Amino acid sequence: MIRRRRLEERLFKGLMVASLALIGLIFAALVGVILVRGAAALSWETLVQTPRGGYYLGGGGGIANAIVGSLYLGLGGLLLSLAWSVPVAFGLQKEFIGKRWARVTRLTLDVLWGTPSIVLGAIAFVVMPLVGLRTSLLSGILVLSVLMLPIMTRAMEEVIRMVPRELKETALAMGSTRLETVLAVTWRQALPGLVTGVLLAFGRGIGDAASILFATGYTDRIPSSLLDPVASLPLAVFFQIQTPIPAVQERAYAAAVVLMVIILLISLISRWAGARLSRHRIR
């Protein structure tokens, strides 16, 4: 029996190592292809210039419009979804809502999370004319906020539920109201996880193309108002990779490199912020 258990342990350890190695190889291959193909077109001019005449035929210019547009869309969608997610995540705790409504809300968020982003884009394409909107930065922000909302809310809710109940009960026993307990105890204890959830949703939103495909349009200019069309890095990759001109395809890979670096920075910031803020938690 002992020998059998040892064999099973070695087997599953071997499978875990093989799985990790496979994932690492796939990731290295993806990064390698993007870097090799995009290195030739990646330059300072590419990062700070907008497309000029003949850009899509191999002419001059860069992807500054897509970089700025992605940041506008990502940050705008993040702020809007954050305004919805925080009260919903705290409100789902049993101190504020009944079990039935909590289950219904969680189910709704899970269904929304599982909905393909292209479906959200198609719905936005139908709804926008009904409310007087056209393809614009504002439309893209609204769609991305809906995309980020379930991710952010569910991540926050799980983190809040992990706060020790004893801390909440102690605060209530000392005369604090439920709202004061949330602001003074729960919020502080859950802050590292809340930050991680926010950055996770931001990384998901800034890298999505399907949801904003019909909502933002595409332009070679940097938008000056919420009602202007806007470019983004995912759509820059999508449109440029389809052309038969090698120079334009290389620029698509350069845009992919920039997008990958942004998401990598978000991941690093998330880990750093989580580790730094966790120092003040009571375990």
Image (cartoon, rainbow, N blue to C red):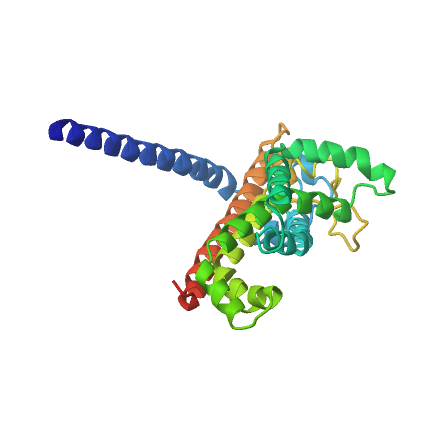
To which quarter of the image does residue 253 belong?
top right
Q: Can you say which quadrant of the picture contains the N terminus?
A: top left
Vertical order, 34 against 227 (above or below):
above
Count of marks overlaid on the render:
0
Q: Nearer the viewer, residue 81 or 71?
A: 81
Residue 176 shown left or right of residue 213 in the figure: left
Residue 99 at least partly seen: yes
Classify residue 15 as left or right of residue 193. left
Residue 138 screen position, x and y as percent: 77, 49
Q: Which residue appears at 16% of the width and 32% of the height?
A: 6
95 is higher (above) or lower (below) than 32: below
Asked whether residue 233 appears in the rendered view, the answer is no
**Residue at (40% x, 33% y) in the render:** 26
x then y, percent, for residue 152: 58, 49
* Residue 58 location (% of width, % of height): 64, 37
- Position of the C terminus, as image quadrant, is bottom left
The residue nearer to you, when weighing 253 against 76, is 76
Q: Nearer the viewer, residue 191 or 14?
A: 191
**Where is residue 117 shown, x and y percent of the image?**
64, 35
